[in-house]
Every structure is written in structure tokens, then in C-alpha cells.
């Protein structure tokens, strides 16, 4: 992706995140209230994730699991940890909406590889070897559309690297529409 396209991608991310936060704030507020009514604990979930260049940042999501799970990737957590409302939020990908703040701040992009936990060292190294850490992580991406989760680090890093080869503003728009229309699935659990 050339310099002009990168500038266009960042401008689009910034503008879409700003408008998205404004337009979707009622949805986020209602979801947060429902989370608080269903289970004790905060409605917003903040977790350290690995971003561009291997730098860490705080990633925000709506909480879909019971509290006390710890800092584990979704694929290492039992399905019983997901709350009934959390399952619905994940199915509709609404749990990702607070990440618009991360996109607005420039820590993430709307499209890119999903940010992983610092403890997922095998995935981090596989991504580093394939150049995936050179781009901002995304709210959605090729791996999410294809249903590739973080339980297979090499497959995920390889799929992420495919995005790098075919990265364009047009393809990003296509992946966003596919996500909005329900392609892919939420993070898998055991």
C-alpha cells in the first residue's frame, strides 16, 4: 500500500471512528447498561494487546465474559465463561464497538490483523516473521471473515500476511461490509 493509500486509510479510519462513536453511542450505552444488569462487574473490558511494531496498548471491548477469568485468550476459556448477553453481543460483533476509540486514537485500524495478548508469544513471533507487526491491528480483517481464530498461531499469522499482499482501500471497504453483513464469527472459545 503506497503512502497516499496509507494516508487515505488513516483519514478514513479517523473519520469513520469519530462518526461511529457519535452515531453508535446510544447502542453502546444500552449494551453497557444491559451488561451491568446481567452480571456484576464493569461493562467495559480493557486489556493489554500487542499493536504495530510490537508495542502494547490498551484495547477496549464490551465485556462478554463473567469477571475473574484472567488475562487469557478467548480460545483458552471455556464456553461457560461467556454470559448469555455476551454470546449475543459476540454474534452481532457489538462487543467490538468500543474499539472505535482505539481506531480514533490511531492504535488500531478498522481493518487489519486482530491484536493479540502479549502472552501469545508464538503468534507474535509468527507475525513478526511475516511482517504482520508492521501494520496497525484491526477491528476486523481477513482472518475474522474466514473464521480463523487465535488457536492456530501459524495459520492466523499466514492469513494475516495474505492481507498484507492484497491490502488496498477498496479491499478494506469490502471487508468492513462483509463484517457488517455478518461474515465470519466472534472469537472462539473451548
Image (spheres, helix red, strand yellow):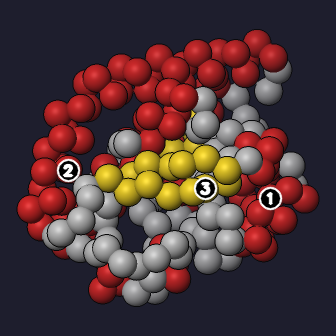
**Disc 3 crowd, CA 10 A, few/some/many (<14, 14-19, 20+):** many
Report which residue position mark 1 lands on.
127
Q: Counting residues from the N terminus, which is met first, the one under dot 1 or under dot 3?
A: 3
- Closer-to-camera residue (114/68): 68
Q: 10 Å neighbourhood of mark 2: few (<14), some, or many (≥20)?
A: some
Return the residue at label 3. Answer: 49
Find disc 2 in the rendering and name its residue: 32
Name the secondary structure under disc 3.
strand
Q: Residues within 10 Å of mark 1 (few under 14, many from 20)?
A: many
Decide if residue 119 is in sight here.
yes
Q: Is residue 147 above or below residue 72?
A: above
The residue at 17%/34% (across/down) is 26
Helix, strand or loop under label 2 = helix
Left or right side of 48 for 24: left
> Residue 23 versus residue 104: which sits nearer the camera?
104
Cβ atoms at labels 1 and 3 below 8 Å apart: no
Amino acid at each position: 500500500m503506497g503512502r497516499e493509500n496509507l494516508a487515505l486509510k488513516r483519514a478514513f479510519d479517523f473519520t469513520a471512528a469519530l462518526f461511529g462513536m457519535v452515531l453508535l453511542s446510544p447502542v453502546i450505552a444500552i449494551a453497557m447498561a444491559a451488561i451491568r444488569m446481567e452480571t456484576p462487574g464493569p461493562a467495559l473490558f480493557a486489556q493489554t494487546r500487542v499493536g504495530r511494531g510490537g508495542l502494547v496498548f490498551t484495547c477496549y471491548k464490551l465485556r462478554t465474559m463473567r469477571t475473574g477469568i484472567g488475562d487469557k485468550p478467548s480460545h483458552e476459556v471455556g464456553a461457560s465463561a461467556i454470559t448469555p448477553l455476551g454470546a449475543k453481543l459476540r454474534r452481532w460483533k457489538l462487543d467490538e464497538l468500543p474499539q472505535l476509540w482505539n481506531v480514533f486514537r490511531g492504535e488500531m485500524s478498522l481493518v487489519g490483523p486482530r491484536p493479540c495478548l502479549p502472552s501469545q508469544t508464538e503468534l507474535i513471533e509468527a507475525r513478526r516473521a511475516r511482517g504482520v507487526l508492521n501494520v496497525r491491528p484491526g477491528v476486523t480483517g481477513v482472518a475474522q471473515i474466514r473464521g480463523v481464530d487465535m488457536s492456530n498461531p501459524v495459520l492466523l499469522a499466514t492469513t494475516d500476511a495474505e492481507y498484507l499482499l492484497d491490502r488496498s482501500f477498496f479491499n478494506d471497504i469490502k471487508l468492513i461490509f462483509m463484517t457488517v453483513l455478518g461474515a465470519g464469527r466472534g472469537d472462539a472459545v473451548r
